[in-house]
Image: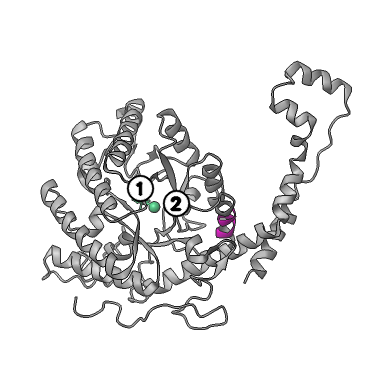
Amino acid sequence: MNMPFFSDVDAITYLGPDSDEALGFRWYDADRVVGDKTMAEHLRFAVCYWHSFAANGLDIFGAGTLDRPWAEGSATFDSSMSPMAAAEMKQDAAFEFFSKLGVPYYCFHDVDMAPFSGGYAADADALKAMVDRAGSKMDETGIKLLWGTANLFSHPRFLAGAATNPDPEMFARAAAQVCDVLEATHQLGGENYVLWGGREGYETLLNTDMAKESDQLARFMHLVVEHKQRIGFTGTILIEPKPFEPTKHQYDYDSATCHAFLQKYDLADEIKLNIEVNHATLAGHDFNHEVAYAAANGILGSIDANAGDDRLGWDVDRFPVSVEQMTLGMIEILRAGGLGTGGLNFDAKLRRPSIARDDLFHAHIGGMDTMARALLAAHSVLDSGELDSLRTERYAGWDGDLGQQIMNGSLDLAALRERAGSTADPQPVSGRQEMLENLVARHIERAS
Ligand code: XUL
Ligand code: CO
């Protein structure tokens, strides 16, 4: 590419909370140490290729609005370019963006990076060429790959699912695609590989054998784990809970459903979760619930950091703006000891009317500053020890004789009945919820 695509924007730097400069970080200060790590090491930000570069701004009511000359259907699509030239222009713009924003990572689907025409052999060749090119860009810029993934949901062939398709030919076709992208992710030094169950679900039980589909999905995951080991990929395999959309019933409903599935099929030691904030909301959970559940069961992997909308019940993929919501999530991430090979991927998109090129910077700056403030507040809450000491005190009885005897099995049901006859009735104590909410609010106000 001759001209930088984002030529009006310079590298984004940390300017501090007093700055009024819109194209600068007010809170995200990559090298600032928070506890035992720098902000960059805690947050491990990634930009996603799909919403930021592949999408054209189309919604179900209208045409693409965004200025993306390489993207068919965008407002400025240049149809004179070959599909490969368009993919190269997109890749140049993407790496220019990652570098100027100063994020360490990115994430991609195969179809985001390479022009796919639908024929397997041609698509695999196109992917290979674009992945090699991405490797050179990564060497040049130092940008790393958080995760790669195969798109097994957009092409009509996958209308009834990929691994859970009633036709094993579709399973086999999906497997070929995943085999390629897993190897591409390995080639690029990716730190994780994501399997989002795009259309792994169903619309109606009238034509669906749920037990069979569940076995097929598990078989698919075992194939991925086996291949990962065969090629020596040391990254983490992640699945991504989502309750519905695109199918009415998605099998990977939420963290708990995924955990039960992984346990049933002996995959819980091999696969972890990529938890998306907006998916938690759609499942009727809080984001921090999903993180805490995964952490408590040893399957917290990575985060897709976006947000839903209070009044919209679908996957709106907004950039995160609520410091409170993210602080509650960060508290659970810090309690879990961090994200390991995972990170915070902005699986978030611009609103359709946000058509200026620098809107993509404003969106990510806002998301990164929100997460950085959340990190500072969460660290401050935990560092003060107030929350943990109150929680420990709340459960103190379990360290005493009665708690230990219950848990070690030395008191059976009848023995507990006998004990009730000879002790005074226990008295409830306050849960202190409002006081604790104020405590968190105080840390959010003061963390700087
Ligand atoms: C869809 C979603 C995907 C996955 C990757 O809701 O979140 O973008 O993150 O396929
Ligand atoms: Co996602």
Q: CA distance from mark 2 to mark 1?
A: 10 Å
**Along the line of sight, the residue nearer the viewer: 352 or 274:** 274
What secondary structure is marked by label 2? strand
Q: Who's the residue at 57% across and 58% down the image?
A: 325
Q: Amino acid at mark 1?
A: Val
Q: Amino acid at mark 2?
A: Ser
Residue at the front extreme of this rendering: 232
User: Residue 259, labelled with which disc?
Assistant: none
- On the image, the x and y values in percent for residue 96 come to 30, 73
What secondary structure is marked by label 1? strand
The quarter of the picture where the C terminus appears is bottom right
The residue labelled by disc 1 is 194
Task: For ligand 1, tell me if the residue under mark 1 lies within 8 Å.
Answer: yes
Q: In which quadrant of the rendered view does residue 138 lie?
A: bottom left
- Asked whether the beta carbons under mark 2 and mark 1 sit within 8 Å of each other, the answer is yes
Whether residue 285 is visible to the viewer of this picture, yes or no, is no
The residue labelled by disc 2 is 302
SS assignment for the magenta stretch, majority = helix
Q: Earlier in the sequence, mark 2 or mark 1?
A: 1
Q: Who's the residue at 27% across and 71% down the image?
A: 93
Magenta stretch holds residue 329 = yes
Left or right? Give the position of 183 relative to 379: left
Q: In which quadrant of the rendered view does residue 385 lie?
A: bottom right
**Along the line of sight, the residue nearer the viewer: 22 or 135:** 135
- Magenta highlight range: 326-331
Left or right? Give the position of 162 relative to 368: left
